[in-house]
Image (cartoon, grey):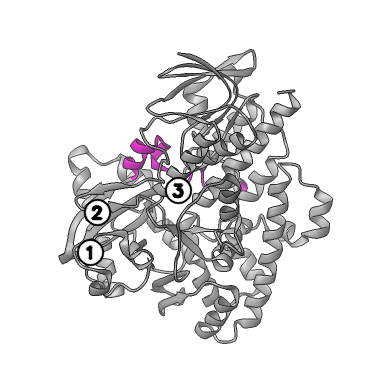
């Protein structure tokens, strides 16, 4: 089959869905192709026994209320996408040790004033510094919004005049900014909790990246859809079709076709599609290695790929449990519990790479705390999430793979009992374990790295955002998704998909298309 459209979006993950919707709302003829038979990528669900499991979504930030919407709710409203959002009750509970070795069991609320009040409770005398800190966060947020709205052409003079502290702090590591501001050490330990959502420790993560996520959670609260993340994906697909968009499932992109140095189409398992532009929700390393002529790969992209040295981020490990007791019967009161050996994120990150014996970091979620109907009456459903390096999985012999992944599951179940006093093991009716290789096979991501490249050091969010000011060197093709400027996570993927779609449409306008 040969077909011609304006834009092809490859991959119906979060960024792909957002990009496709944005292009469709702008009146473009858009074809969305997906190698799976369902949309969403990680934003989906699966069933084991009588339980439906959420594969990946912990919570979405930047939703906000109907009266005071955050960027993601406003985006969905603009697209005409309807989702049944359910608010998460609190930021998080963290059970660990402060960096001075004393026990740590802290629960933090949503709302800036509430957060500052609770921090004063845990760290007496911290209020003035926390108030100063949130003033800085407000400026960072406003500056980031300006950069995003500029579509890659932020005015340096505006940044200097309106958002000087963004330029002073944004590219520095979080830990360095905190120390320079003299934020009390225990406050730093508590605020470090969210590092696991980004996969980078505080000594390497750019301040602009962390404060954007942190502030969106604290100020706007967190939400989940009532019917797993697949509800979002289905709602976006339905709206895309209403706008005239076309979807091909069970269709894999195999090669990007060029006329001279400009993209002109895609060869897929269902035929050749002629198009003016492609937005590819595919890791750039795969595009350059397998999907386009080597002579057309710009020198800049070769150097960037080499510099990243396959520095992939957040290779996920997840244990899903269906329990034959209710959350109340099991004593589960918190939606989200972070369990860690220490609150020192640099130590925890290093231990993640050390394998089963050293990895003491996991996040436990119980969906029923937010949505009582997440599982059949009298039951509950939840999952543990952690991360790891590629070495521990790549060196495993096939016959030891199952044993090794189950050792991890038992360890995290034991940690929940020992640290939180919640014993779920006798009540497990269904259990399913996903390793980095599970995510690699299902999503096609290198080494199961759902977050793309590490957003650290020279390759942080600040640097990636500023690089948008230069034209993308491959005409008619832009990678989108986790490897893009906004990095990882659901909210970032939706925002990145829209941002890259805007840039593609700008390219087409400048070409007269």
Marker count (numbered) = 3
Residue 262 lies left or right of residue 377; in this view the side is right
Quadrant of the rendering where the N terminus is positioned: top left
Circle on res. 379: 1
The answer to whether residue 255 is above or below residue 147 is above
Judge whether residue 275 is colored magenta: no
Picture coordinates of residue 435, whole percent (x, y): 31, 46
Q: CA distance from mark 2 to mark 1?
A: 9 Å
User: 10 Å neighbourhood of mark 2: few (<14), some, or many (≥20)?
Assistant: some
Circle on res. 309: none
Picture coordinates of residue 386, whole percent (x, y): 36, 55
The answer to which of marks 2 and 3 sits earlier in the sequence is 2
Q: Residue furthest left?
A: 426
Q: CA distance from mark 3 to mark 1?
A: 24 Å
Quadrant of the rendering where the C terminus is positioned: top right
> Which sits in the foreground, 39 or 290?
39
Evaluate if marks 2 and 1 touch, with contact meaning CB atoms under 8 Å apart: yes
The answer to which of marks 2 and 1 sits earlier in the sequence is 2
Q: Residue at x 54, y 79 (%)?
A: 119
Q: In this picture, which residue range is highlighted in magenta?
A: 436-458
- Residue under numbered circle 2: 51
Answer whether residue 143 is visible to the viewer in this image.
yes
Q: CA distance from mark 2 to mark 3?
A: 19 Å
């Amino acid at each position: 089959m040969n077909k011609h459209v304006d834009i092809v979006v490859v991959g119906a993950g979060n960024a792909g869905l957002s990009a496709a919707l944005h292009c469709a709302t702008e009146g473009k003829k858009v074809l969305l192709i997906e190698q799976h038979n369902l949309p969403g990528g990680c934003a989906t669900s699966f069933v084991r026994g009588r339980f439906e499991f959420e594969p990946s979504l912990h919570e979405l930030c930047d939703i906000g209320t109907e009266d005071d919407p955050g960027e993601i709710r406003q985006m969905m409203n603009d697209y005409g996408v309807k989702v049944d959002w359910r608010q998460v009750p609190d930021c998080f509970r963290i059970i660990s040790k402060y960096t001075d070795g004393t026990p740590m069991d802290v629960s933090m609320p949503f709302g800036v004033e509430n957060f500052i009040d609770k921090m004063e409770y845990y760290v007496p005398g911290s209020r003035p510094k926390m108030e100063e800190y949130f003033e800085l966060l407000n400026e960072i947020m406003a500056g980031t919004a300006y950069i995003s709205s500029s579509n890659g052409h932020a005015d340096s003079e505006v940044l200097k005049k309106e958002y000087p502290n963004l330029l002073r702090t944004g590219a520095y590591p979080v830990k360095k900014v905190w120390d320079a501001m003299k934020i009390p050490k225990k406050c730093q330990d508590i605020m470090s909790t969210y590092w696991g959502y980004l996969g980078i420790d505080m000594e390497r993560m750019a301040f602009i990246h962390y404060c954007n996520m942190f502030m969106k959670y604290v100020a706007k609260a967190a939400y989940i859809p009532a019917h797993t993340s697949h509800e979002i994906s289905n709602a976006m697909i339905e709206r895309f079709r209403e706008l005239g968009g076309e979807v091909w499932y069970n269709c894999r992109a195999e090669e990007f076709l060029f006329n001279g140095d400009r993209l002109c189409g895609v060869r897929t398992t269902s035929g050749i599609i002629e198009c003016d532009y492609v937005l590819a929700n595919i890791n750039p390393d795969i595009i350059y290695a397998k999907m386009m002529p080597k002579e057309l790969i710009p020198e800049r992209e070769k150097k960037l790929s080499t510099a990243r040295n396959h520095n992939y981020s957040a290779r996920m490990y997840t244990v899903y449990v269906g329990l034959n007791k209710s959350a109340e019967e099991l004593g589960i009161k918190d939606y989200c519990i972070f369990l860690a050996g220490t609150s020192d994120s640099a130590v925890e990150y290093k231990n993640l790479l050390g394998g089963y014996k050293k990895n003491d970091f996991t996040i436990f979620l119980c969906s029923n705390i937010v949505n009582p109907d997440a599982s059949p009456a009298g039951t509950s459903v939840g999952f543990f999430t952690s991360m790891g390096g590629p070495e521990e999985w790549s060196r495993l012999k096939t016959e030891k793979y199952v044993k090794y992944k189950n050792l991890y599951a038992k360890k995290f179940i034991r940690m929940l009992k020992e640290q939180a006093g919640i014993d779920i093991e006798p009540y497990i009716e269904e259990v399913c374990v996903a390793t980095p290789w599970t995510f690699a096979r299902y999503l096609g991501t290198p080494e199961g790295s759902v977050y793309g490249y590490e957003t650290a050091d020279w390759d942080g969010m600040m640097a990636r955002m500023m690089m948008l000011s230069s034209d993308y060197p491959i005409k008619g093709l832009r990678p989108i998704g986790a490897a893009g400027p906004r990095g990882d996570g659901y909210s970032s993927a939706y925002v990145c998909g829209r941002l890259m779609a805007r840039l593609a449409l700008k390219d087409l306008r400048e070409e007269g298309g």
